[in-house]
Image (cartoon, grey):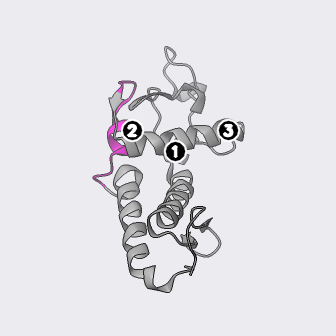
Amino acid sequence: MTEYDALRDAERLVRDIVIESEAACNPQRGDAEIHAVNLAQGIPVQVSPRLSVLLRSALWAARMTDGVVDPLSADDADLDEASTAPIHPLPTYLDVQLDGETVLTPYGVSLDISETAKADTVDRAAAAVARDLECGVLVRMGETGSSQLAVALAPAGCDPT
């Protein structure tokens, strides 16, 4: 923080953003919204605006890395032609459809967007603190070795004194 007096307010803002993201897509939470998407198995599901943004971010990362960053769950890694029903082609991230706040995932797959959601959340938190509290901030989320960092500066025109 560039403004020590804003630390408590910044912590509250970051905590609220993290809670919102975890409620949307943390696979360890039984009440996370992502489970409704994963259980739909080929049926369109209406999702919250937050989950829609997180899914869009995960799909963008998959496209930019040609699938190296993959939103399909690692549990689905052993899907192959033999384990997939013949009427369904082998699914990939390219088969996930997102139209506004409606998502359609292929039959037989689950999404795990934890890592891209972490990056998106830390970026959003840093931007919110800088914007709302008009100060510079560095936000770190995660454990050493697998953490995400984001830096945001106070908006132009703010007096840093």
User: In the image, what residue type sits under mark 2?
Assistant: Asn
CA gap between label 2 and label 1 equals 10 Å
* Residue found 44% across the figure and 64% down from its top: 132
Give the class, few, some or many, for how many residues have Cα within 10 Å of label 2's Cα (few <14, many ≥20): many
Q: Nearer the viewer, residue 20 or 36?
A: 20
Discs 2, 1 touching: Cβ within 8 Å? yes
CA gap between label 1 and label 3 equals 12 Å
Q: In the image, which disc is placed on residue 38?
A: 2
Asked which secondary structure carries label 1, the reply is loop
* Residue found 57% across the figure and 37% down from its top: 59
User: In the image, what residue type sits under mark 3?
Assistant: Gly
Q: Which residues are magenta?
A: 30-44
Residue 31 magenta-highlighted: yes
* Residue found 40% across the figure and 55% down from its top: 21
Asked which secondary structure carries label 2, the reply is helix
**Pointer 3 residue:** 67
In the rendered view, would you say 126 is above or below 9? Answer: above
**Pointer 1 residue:** 73
User: In the image, what residue type sits under mark 1?
Assistant: Ser
